[in-house]
Image (cartoon, helix red, strand yellow):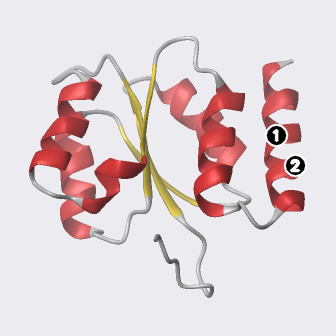
Amino acid sequence: MFSLDAARLPIVLVVDPMVASRHAMWRLLSRSFGVLEAPDARRARDWLTSRPNIDALVVQMELPDAQGSDLVKSFATAQVAVASRAILVARPVDLRMVVTRLAGWFFSRDAMRAEVLWREADRLCS
């Protein structure tokens, strides 16, 4: 069972080469999550080395230096716990799906918080 210290927000690492896409994801998630950003696989690995408390990943399939699926597989092979909470996305990113997965992992007992995330995703998609 996943357990998170109630004193901190879950931390999500967004791995996406496009600045605009990372910014949109940050706007969507930053009220409910700590959000870190990486433009490529190398910097994602750097973040996980320096911040092993990252709770989830949102990884674009096409990265400049790797395939997103290969990056997640490498984390799983190295037994990095966050690999089990990785969301692989393609363009256009389905923000509602991302929010649904994250809310299921972290806010399954807080329907109001999940609803706020879904409304924000709908707002950004319209």
75 relative to 79, above or below:
above
Q: Quadrant of residue 50?
A: bottom left
Which mark is on residue 30? none
**Figure disc tally:** 2
Asked whether 90 or 63 is in front, the reply is: 90
How many neighbours does mark 1 have within 10 angstroms: few (below 14), some (14-19), or many (20 or more)? Answer: many
Q: Is residue 59 left or right of residue 19?
A: left
Residue behind mark 1: 118
Indicate the secondary structure of the residue bearing disc 1: helix
> Is residue 71 found left or right of 6 in the rendered image?
left
Q: Where, by quadrant of the figure, is residue 34 drawn? A: bottom right
Q: Residue at x 79, y 47 (%)?
A: 117
Where does the image place residue 57, in percent across and percent down from the top left? 41, 46
- Looking at the image, which residue sits at the far front? 1
The amino acid beneath tag 1 is Trp
Compared with 53, 34 (above or below) is: above
Residue 111 lies left or right of residue 109; in this view the side is: right
